[in-house]
Image: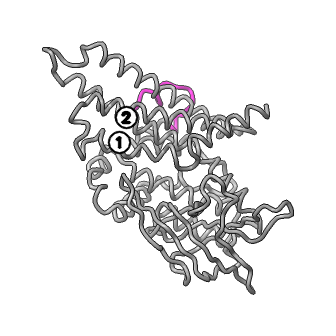
Amino acid sequence: MDSFIATTPFFTTQQRSLAERVSELVEREIEVRAADDEGDADEALRAYVMLLAENDLLKYAIATPGQPFDLRSFCIIRETLSYSSSLADLAFVMQGLGTYAISIAATDHVRDFWLARARNGQAIAAFALTEPDAGSDVAALKTTARPEDDAYILNGRKRFISNAGVADFYAVFARTGTREDGRAELSAFIVSARMPGFSVAEKTEMMAPHPIGELEFKDCRVPAEDMIGNRGDGLRLSLQTLDMFRASVGAAACGMARRALDESLLHAKSRQQFGKPISGHQLIQGKLADMATDLDAARLLVYRAAYLKDAGAQHSTREASEAKLFATEAADRIIDQAVQLHGGTGLVRGTVVERLYRDVRALRIYEGTSEIQKLVIANQLLKE
């Protein structure tokens, strides 16, 4: 088992056992297929969802109504999956992101139907918030939902939606009116991929394997019972979802960074230059020391934030943003140094550090850019 999880005080005995079990699964089932992620990412993601379901891991991604969400276990799984495959991590986290609002606000029979299917791998989830003109500024959403009889009619377009074209259902956020203060009234809906008027407008090719694309709604009729929560709850539900999962992005970054450090240590001990392993040169030792220190600091911030959330802290927004900000920026530095340490080998397409170099870059952007995290942290500091 990873010594950090075994020795730091943030974890219960059950969480340490989970970490060991997931590590064994990743080594046995995921590491051997991770190289194939570069092929058909859609099919690879579907296979990962089924693998996670078969090993009863999706229950850690999907909140159980009436029970506290185990964020530390969620972070442990994300970190461990990311060590070998960012696509396996995506398969895991999207089941959580796409269902969290449903778990806390949907009507009982609708909630139970979708959560059960997501938990056993029968249905793949997605979270549809971002639009061409609305990223960090959620209130700028232009997709509309107007009431008509016992339904809402959705029109608009979503962009950069993970699992586009793979998901069976989407948590979609749209404007249902204007509030008294002039800002948009946002509401949330469950949209099945089979609904008339819904389509995947295009798939977007990213620098790393990632099923993602644009969604289009053309007079898409969504039953009123598929509204998540009440009319106008959309902004609160979207922010609650992002706040719950923000620290876990840092956990994924730590998994990638830990793999980069491990690969660098192996390479430094075996690569000979000037008559000795490069690990014997002080400049290389300095790089390794910086990488290890950054990684330890990142993991401490991530699991502090997760621990506080699990312990029922009234406020942990600042800690979650600090974890996301520092861990993703640190992972970028660590992996960049890993490529540098590997020299020309680090630039060869398909090598582990080259893959990590492409995989890690998105983490500083999605679920709140590094710049947005700094604003959140400063805002929380000024409130204290």
Q: Which residue is mark 1?
A: 356
In the image, what residue type sits under mark 1? Answer: Leu
Asked whether, in this view, residue 267 is left or right of residue 165, the answer is left
Q: Which residues are magenta?
A: 1-15
- Distance, label 2 to label 1, CA atoms, is 7 Å
Where on the picture, by quarter, is residue 51? Answer: bottom left
Element on which disc 1 rests: helix
The reply to whether callout 2 and callout 1 are in contact (CB within 8 Å) is: yes
Q: Which residue is mark 2?
A: 335
The percent coordinates of residue 379 (x first, y second) are 73, 37
The percent coordinates of residue 9 (x first, y second) are 56, 26
In the image, what residue type sits under mark 2? Answer: Ile
- Sequence-wise, the earlier of marks 2 and 1 is 2
Element on which disc 2 rests: helix
The quadrant the C terminus occupies is top right
Residue drawn at the location 82% of the way across and 62% of the way down: 182
